[in-house]
Amino acid sequence: MSTGTVADMVDDLRQQIDSGALKVDEKLPSTRVLMETYGLSNNAVYRGVALLKAQGYTYSRQGAGVFVRDRRAMIGGARRIKGITQPGESIHWRYSVRTQAPDWVAEYLGEGECVERARTVRRGELILQASRSWVHIDVAAVVPEIDEPRPVDPESTWQAVYAERSGVPVRVVSVSVGSRLATEDDREALSLGEGACSVTLMWNVYAADERVIGVGEAVYPSDQRVELKIS
């Protein structure tokens, strides 16, 4: 295949990752191979790989290359609303409490009380993800189970249950990814060791009838520890 465009290279690699042709933690072809395969310059290949990283499809190991990231971080839309666990994974609930919306959450839900829910997703003893969601207090009138630290339905999510009971579809209106140094809560939830380390994040915004009813933050262990030098 030789299209000569970065977009086609990125689309093709994303399809291979989504289909499983390129598996989680598998190394991407070298820059030279990608240049020859897609008819691109080395700078164009670098741009394409950087875009895949920004979209959460790949990650780098210093001196080793670029590898396929676990795609659970990019599950979206209806699949995320229906539930995100995969075979062999289990959800462990941490808490569900009424709290004042943090400033950044209040920008979406409005100021005042909301329901904060926290959980981890595991495969055996391995913690794959720690997530928190902030749900508009009005949702509790339709789905009172959100006040309890457990699934609102064994096979579904609060978003799907709300949509079923209210008759109003819930959709993901925004997905963004980023990274930060691990906080104390991140460290506890993900069982991270001592020392500074970074985590990968994904934020989701859920809406019903053009009104935001929930915000979610998923945190994933990054593959590389970082050292802080203070001068």
Image (cartoon, helix red, strand yellow):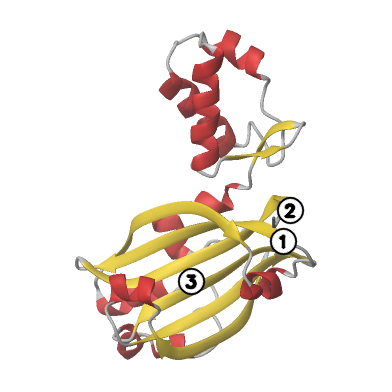
Give the camera-side residue of 52 and 120. 52
Residue at the front extreme, as displayed:
231
Q: CA distance from mark 3 to mark 2?
A: 40 Å
Label 2: how many Cα within 10 Å (few below 14, some 14–19, many 20+): few
Q: CA distance from mark 3 to mark 1?
A: 35 Å
Amino acid bearing label 3: Ser
Q: SS of the residue at dot 3?
A: loop
> Is the residue under label 2 in contact with that under label 1 (CB below 8 Å)?
yes
The residue where tag 3 is placed is: 156
Q: Earlier in the sequence, mark 3 or mark 1?
A: 3
Q: Earlier in the sequence, mark 3 or mark 2?
A: 3
Give the camera-side residue of 127 and 66. 66
Label annotation for residue 227: 2
Indicate which label's residue lies in the foreground, 3 or 2: 2
Residue 71 to residue 155: above or below: above
Residue occupying the point 29% across, 86% down: 138
Amino acid bearing label 2: Glu
Residue at the left extreme, as displayed:
209
Q: CA distance from mark 1 to mark 2?
A: 6 Å
